Image (tube, grey):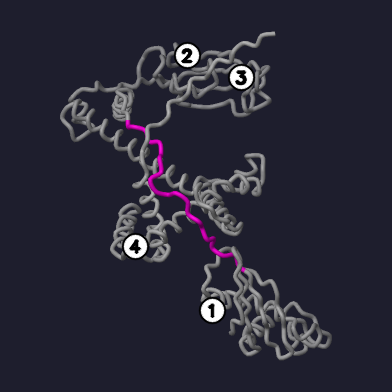
């Protein structure tokens, strides 16, 4: 395999490669063996015609295109990736010439990784909020902890807000039962507003064993058009009323739900956890904003192929997440009233931003001579193993070492931008000025 020339432009490169007939021969034979079963030649049983007969009938170059396609991964690796270029996207063959002796000359075209012209990326002024933890947030967490250990007991009294009523129900519209309007032994938490407005309020006051007709009207914007705005009757029977008994939030409660002895100690721990969580979120937002501003200051021409590759990955991630929930990307697209192209187009802005950010961080890493040591890689492997509850060796087998090192390098570049940024107080929202009344 001989590389005859490499021509580079701003964002594309053309590599001209020559292959001898001998280099092509194994691939030509594979192409023949692959397609001969479908070829009919007079005088031969289908699939049994010799290669030279097929080439005589259809042209001596009949298998060349398939042979080149078969060899292309090796051609790309040995002829393109060895050059002093950084290809991206999907390469293509723009020209193929076949010589009389069977040698083939290919012109392979590929997009190039963009060369970025960095703008300001250090000492950027970025808004950063101060952490504030409200007493109500601490109280809400205490309430959640109390609810988690609450006891549920059956009571012999009418249901009231906060209780759980175990009910049978069936809905009728003009005396006819409608689809989806029936349930048995349904546990309805009164005050949860899970049913249409007015339903729970009329169940309140009912006792175990009581039956009642509930008159109600579906909201005009109800998702089922055949019921929207319609008056209906629900026949309801209560089987059981359950009361949720929430413990007092005292020192005994604290000892039961935590490692602390007093309410004050638990409150202080909750406040710290909320503060730390908020601070982490503010720090992430600060870094993201700094990187975004640095990316906006950069001048670069990004090839569409890089965005398309990122889109492919985002579509795959989205499909994986939906499948883990028992759905699919295609079903989601139909539910949203569009198709796969519509979903892809909706993701394009985020893909463009992601590619631009990666190009920025890569350029900053190069400008700042950022490197990643083997010790840093090893530490990251350990963190991932602990996070995913996996063996360290299994994590190393699952991850590409070069990919991990590249990812860590980009993260270090992002931290450099954020650590040099200057935090400023967020601007107060300007009061809307009252427009003066017009006079005529």
Residue 287 visible in the picture: yes
Question: Quick one: which residue is furthest to the left in this view?
Answer: 261
Question: What is the magenta range?
Answer: 110-131
Q: Residues within 10 Å of mark 1 (few under 14, many from 20)?
A: some
Q: Earlier in the sequence, mark 3 or mark 2?
A: 2
Assign the magenta stretch its main secondary structure: loop
> Looking at the image, do the residues carrying marks 3 and 4 touch, with CB atoms under 8 Å apart?
no
- Tell me which corner region of the image, top left, top right, bottom left or bottom right, holds residue 409: bottom left
Asked whether, in this view, residue 69 is left or right of residue 188, the answer is: right
Frontmost residue, 261 versus 380: 380
Q: Secondary structure at mark 2?
A: loop
Question: Quick one: which residue is furthest to the top in this view?
Answer: 440
Per the rendering, the mark at residue 372 is 4
Residue indicated by mark 2: 210
- The vertical placement of 52 against 70, above or below, is below
The image quadrant where one finds the C terminus is top right
Q: Secondary structure at mark 3?
A: loop
> Looking at the image, do the residues carrying marks 1 and 3 touch, with CB atoms under 8 Å apart?
no
Residue 357 colored in magenta in the image:
no
Q: Residue at x 34, y 56 (%)?
A: 384
> Looking at the image, do the residues carrying marks 2 and 1 touch, with CB atoms under 8 Å apart?
no
Residue indicated by mark 1: 78
Q: Earlier in the sequence, mark 1 or mark 3?
A: 1
Q: Secondary structure at mark 1?
A: helix
Compute the Cα span from label 3 to label 2. Answer: 24 Å
């Amino acid at each position: 395999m001989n590389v005859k020339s490499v021509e580079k432009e701003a964002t594309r490169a053309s590599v001209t490669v020559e292959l001898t007939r001998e280099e092509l021969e194994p691939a030509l034979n594979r192409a023949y063996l692959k397609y001969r079963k479908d070829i009919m030649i007079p005088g031969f049983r289908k699939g049994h015609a010799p290669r030279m007969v097929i080439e005589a009938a259809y042209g001596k170059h009949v298998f060349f295109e398939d042979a080149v396609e078969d060899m292309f991964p090796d051609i790309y690796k040995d002829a393109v990736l060895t050059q002093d270029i950084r290809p991206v996207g999907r390469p293509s063959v723009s020209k193929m010439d076949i010589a009389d002796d069977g040698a083939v000359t290919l012109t392979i075209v590929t997009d190039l990784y963009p060369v970025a012209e960095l703008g300001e990326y250090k000492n950027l002024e970025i808004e950063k909020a101060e952490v504030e933890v409200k007493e109500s947030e601490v109280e809400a967490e205490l309430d959640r902890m109390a609810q988690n250990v609450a006891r549920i007991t059956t009571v012999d009294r009418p249901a009231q807000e906060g209780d759980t009523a175990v009910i049978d129900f069936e809905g009728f519209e003009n005396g006819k039962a409608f689809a989806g309007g029936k349930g048995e032994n349904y546990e309805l938490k009164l005050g949860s507003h899970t049913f249409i407005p007015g339903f729970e309020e009329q169940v309140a006051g009912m006792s175990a064993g009581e039956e009642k007709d509930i008159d109600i009207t579906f909201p005009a914007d109800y998702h089922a058009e055949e019921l929207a705005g319609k008056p209906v009757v629900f026949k309801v029977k209560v089987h059981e009323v359950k009361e949720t008994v929430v413990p007092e939030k005292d020192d005994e409660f604290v000892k039961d739900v935590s490692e602390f002895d007093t309410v004050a100690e638990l409150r202080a721990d909750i406040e710290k956890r909320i503060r730390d969580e908020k601070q982490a979120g503010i720090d992430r937002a600060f870094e993201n904003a700094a990187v975004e501003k640095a990316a906006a200051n950069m001048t670069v021409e990004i090839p569409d192929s890089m965005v398309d590759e990122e889109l492919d990955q985002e579509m795959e991630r989205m499909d994986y997440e939906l499948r883990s929930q028992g759905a699919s990307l295609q079903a989601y697209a139909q539910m949203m009233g569009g198709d796969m192209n519509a979903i892809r187009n909706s993701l394009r802005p985020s893909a463009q931003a992601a590619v631009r950010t990666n190009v920025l961080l890569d350029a900053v890493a190069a400008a700042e001579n950022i490197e990643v040591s083997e010790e840093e890689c090893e530490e990251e492997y350990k963190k991932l193993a602990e996070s995913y509850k996996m063996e360290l060796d299994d994590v190393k087998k699952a991850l590409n070492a070069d990919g991990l090192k590249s990812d860590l390098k980009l993260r270090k570049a992002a931290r450099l931008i954020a650590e040099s940024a200057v935090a400023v107080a967020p601007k107060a929202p300007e009061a809307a000025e009252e427009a003066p009344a017009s006079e005529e």
